[in-house]
Amino acid sequence: MPAPSADEIRDVNARYHDVAAAEYDAKWGISYEEPGRQLVVAKLRKALGGPIRRFDRALEIGSGTGYFSLNLARAGLIGQLTCTDISQGMLDELAGTAGRLGIPVETVCTDAERLPFDDDSFDLVFGHAILHHIPDLDTAFSEFRRVLRPGGRIAFCGEPSHHGDRLAALPKRAALALSPWWRRLLGVGRRVDAWDDAEAVEHGLEHVVDVHAFTPSQLEDFAARAGFGDVRVSGEELVAGWFGWANRTLESTAESRQIPSLWFQYAYRGYMALKAVDDHLLEPALPPAIFYNLLVSAAVPPAGAERARPAARARTVAAAR
Ligand SMILES: C[S@@+](CC[C@H](N)C(=O)[O-])C[C@H]1O[C@@H](n2cnc3c(N)ncnc32)[C@H](O)[C@@H]1O
């Protein structure tokens, strides 16, 4: 089969996520309460490499139903929030949840490679599980750089790593094979809608929407080529990732309303226990490339430093000659 074109990837992404939108939060166990807030704030802190200040104007890319941005807004870390996504269905869900939570938000349906915002508009451009869907990342990073003010930051979390993605295929495959027994054990029925995960995998849709898995140096290079400085890449989730992927794959094969709440408690507690192992033992000791998720942050040089940059580059060129 020929590789899909960039336009096909964008089109399938919009359709796939439009269809997924209504059940998305239930499928991924997304919470806008304290547990969700703590997880999201910890991820952003890890990406930025230290304590977080409040960002006056923040732009989320590929915001989906609002997992990241609404939790950050609820934590008081964002002043004015703009959420973008290529799927209007996802943004409609986000707007509904934001309304229920009383969070003011502007939603804009757009491709990450063409941001309809003025230069120097935001203090933070961020996202979760989005970069791997974008066909042309050099164009997207240039757009992130353009709309950021001097001193502004990017922070992207939850990007699949090259090694981690391969390793995660094993628990996914094992869970899919075991799912008939698991459903029988829990007494739940098979999910019947045409676009469930198992069928999406069978029809190869996941392979169309998931365009990249990254090495840490690839992410560093995208940021550096777009003119960012202070680039930082870290990794997270190893054993917690395997556990989470196996459980989510099982859950995606069943009618979610029939899955007993005891199962979700077991899945959540098990994930948190293994995450503590990752956070405290494995992440400090192992290289980022090993983990399932990569996090990248970088900064637009402050105004004075930006003016100095072309001169420094000219000096390097002159010396090379
Ligand atoms: C895996 S979901 C993550 C959603 C959300 N950030 C979260 O963590 O729950 C990826 C999101 O990116 C969006 N997306 C895919 N390709 C995109 C593109 N080229 N530009 C903007 N958004 C895109 C999808 O519609 C989807 O909502």
Image (cartoon, rainbow, N blue to C red):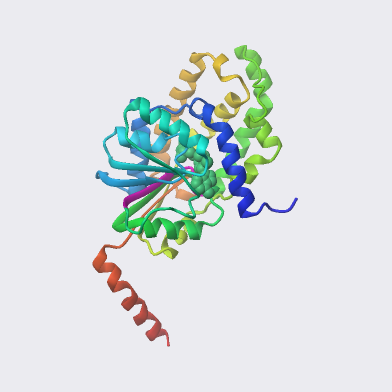
Q: Is residue 124 magenta?
A: yes
Q: Residue furthest bottom?
A: 321
- Depth order, front residue of 176/66: 66
- Depth order, front residue of 191/212: 191
Q: Is residue 320 above or below residue 239?
A: below
**Image spot of residue 29 (x, y percent):** 47, 26
Q: Can the viewer see residue 132 in this picture? A: no
The quadrant of the picture occupied by the C terminus is bottom left
Where on the picture, by quarter, is residue 148?
A: bottom left
Q: Is residue 145 above or below residue 14?
A: below
Q: Is residue 71 above or below residue 84?
A: above
**Along the horizontal axis of the image, is 49 left or right of 141?**
left
Q: Is residue 86 above or below residue 250?
A: below
Residue at the image point whose x is 39% and y is 47% from the top: 126
Q: Residue furthest right?
A: 1
Q: Residue furthest top?
A: 187
**Image spot of residue 257 (x, y percent):** 55, 16
Which stretch appears magenta? Answer: 122-131
**Taken as a whole, is the magenta stretch helix, strand or loop?**
strand
Where on the picture, by quarter, is residue 318?
A: bottom left
Q: Is residue 59 magenta?
A: no
Residue at the image point whose x is 61% and y is 33% from the top: 172
Residue at the image point whose x is 42% and y is 45% from the top: 127
**Image spot of residue 283 (x, y percent):** 41, 43
**Image spot of residue 58 (x, y percent):** 33, 46
Q: Can the viewer see residue 126 in this picture? A: yes
Number of numbered discs visible in the structure rendering = 0
Residue at the image point whose x is 56% and y is 35% from the top: 18
- Depth order, front residue of 192/110: 110
